[in-house]
């Protein structure tokens, strides 16, 4: 896999994640804590929307379309959001976008009372949230290198993964229980309150005005960012690797029907299905002290994506709920490892003046992939069966990463020492 090296900065431990960074970088700690709240709340809406749509329509395809309607706003607004992150105060962008997302969650809560909201309104509000994510995510990702020392960036991204996965696990597991006991409106309301708490924490960070850039704004600057990324094969390959894993290997759209018809576990079990990959990622992220020793991150990404696809195939063969959760968790660990090295290379390979725009492309990839995966899994399940949708998706994931590794040899050969 990746070759080991002796790091120039001595890590806290060879295994444990670098918790000391939270004490050494106060603004990173505030961003980290605010991120925990916002991601925690977002999981309540993820489960609630899927279950609400499935309850109203009894269709996995309709659940998959929730992802489809978010793709346009994510792409269009996301490209613009990257330019904003390079030309405006990133702290302010995070706060404004999260406040507006709190409003969309509050609107979903009102519409969920008595299931009165029409399907088109649910799609519209989730599309609005996706557009706001297109502004918030590039700003949040691009700001991390400004808050932590360069030689500890991999540790910072590992901590980012820890809090992200913990919030996902807690939020997804709790969402099913909250919906089962208090109903859908309560789940959406929790999301709105969590966003407000995240804003309060981020507001305590120092201002983060843009550093000098090329001076261009608007869509021309966004197109410049695309051209900048296209001329870096490794950067593009890392984004394609994530798309491959999420489009084919994340069958979220069939989780509701599997929970009801195969595992027979109801809303609480559905929350656990959503939470299992994040649980595996959380467990793995707690033991990422070794990431500072890797010099060939591209190889780690290739093997990790392949392991994710293999775990999804085995999940698709399971009829035991406990075993299904286990293999989803194993896949989540593999995906977390891939994410740490993808994000590290992406952030270290560009200067701060371009970091917002490259982060926006990465954020689009991260968010469009699962939503395309929802459409893919929902459509295949509608034509064949949920199990076949899972199995074919996992196989396609493995084939895709193998083809990518063959076509882009620079991904296999990439070494961190190559950075400027």
Image (tube, rainbow, N blue to C red):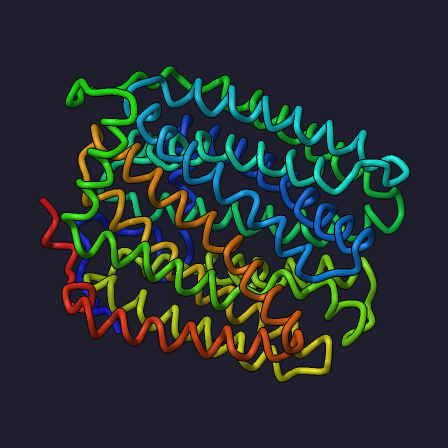
The residue that appears at 45% across and 34% down in the rendered structure is: 134
Residue 135 in percent (x, y) is at 44, 30
Residue 64, horizontal then vertical, whole percent: 62, 56
Where residue 244 sits, quadrant-wise, is: bottom left
Q: Count the marks: how many?
A: 0
Q: Is residue 335 above or below residue 235?
A: below
Q: Quadrant of residue 186?
A: top right
Q: Quadrant of the C terminus?
A: top left
Residue at coordinates 21% horizontally, 74% vertically from top-left? 406
Between 17 and 246, the one lying in front of the other is 246
Q: Is residue 7 left or right of residue 28?
A: left
Residue 325 point in image, percent of width and height: 65, 71
Q: Is residue 310 left or right of 329 when viewed as pictured?
A: left
Query: x, y (%) of residue 183?
Result: 86, 43
Residue at image coords 23%, 27%: 220
Residue beneath the point at 36% across and 17% down: 89
- Quadrant where the image shows the N terminus: bottom left
């Amino acid at each position: 896999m990746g070759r080991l090296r002796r790091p120039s900065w001595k890590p806290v431990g060879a295994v444990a994640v670098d918790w000391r960074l939270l004490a050494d970088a106060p603004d990173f700690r505030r961003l980290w804590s605010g991120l925990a709240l916002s991601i925690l709340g977002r999981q309540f809406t993820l489960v609630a929307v899927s279950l609400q749509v499935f309850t109203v329509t009894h269709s996995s395809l309709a659940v998959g379309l929730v992802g489809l309607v978010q793709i346009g706003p994510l792409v269009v607004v996301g490209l613009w959001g990257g330019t904003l992150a390079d030309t405006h105060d990133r702290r302010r962008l995070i706060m404004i976008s999260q406040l507006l997302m709190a409003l969309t969650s509050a609107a979903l809560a009102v519409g969920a009372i008595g299931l009165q909201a029409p399907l088109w309104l649910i799609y519209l509000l989730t599309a609005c949230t996706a557009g706001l994510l297109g502004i918030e995510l590039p700003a949040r990702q691009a700001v991390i290198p400004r808050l932590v020392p360069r030689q500890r960036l991999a540790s910072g991204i590992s901590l980012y993964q820890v809090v992200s996965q913990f919030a996902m696990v807690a939020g997804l597991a709790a969402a099913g229980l909250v919906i089962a006991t208090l109903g859908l409106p309560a789940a959406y309301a929790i999301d709105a309150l969590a966003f407000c708490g995240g804003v309060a924490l981020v507001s305590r960070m120092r201002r983060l005005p843009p550093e000098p850039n090329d001076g261009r704004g608007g869509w021309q600057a966004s197109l410049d960012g695309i051209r900048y990324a296209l001329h870096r094969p490794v950067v593009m390959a890392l984004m394609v690797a994530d798309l491959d894993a999420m489009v084919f290997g994340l069958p979220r759209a069939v989780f509701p029907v599997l929970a009801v018809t195969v595992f027979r576990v109801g809303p609480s079990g559905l929350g656990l299905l959503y939470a299992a990959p994040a649980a595996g990622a959380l467990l793995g992220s707690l033991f990422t002290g070794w990431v500072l020793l890797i010099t060939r991150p591209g190889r780690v990404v290739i093997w990790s994506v392949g392991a994710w696809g293999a775990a999804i195939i085995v999940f698709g063969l399971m009829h035991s709920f406990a075993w299904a959760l286990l293999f989803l968790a194993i896949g989540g660990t593999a995906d977390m490892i891939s994410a740490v090295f993808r994000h590290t290379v992406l952030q270290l390979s560009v200067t701060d003046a371009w970091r917002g725009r490259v982060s926006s492309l990465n954020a689009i990839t991260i968010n469009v992939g699962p939503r395309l995966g929802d459409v893919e899994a929902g459509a295949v399940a509608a034509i064949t069966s949920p199990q076949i949708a899972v199995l074919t998706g996992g196989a396609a994931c493995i084939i895709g990463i193998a083809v990518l590794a063959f076509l882009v040899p620079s991904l296999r050969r990439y070494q961190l020492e190559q950075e400027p």
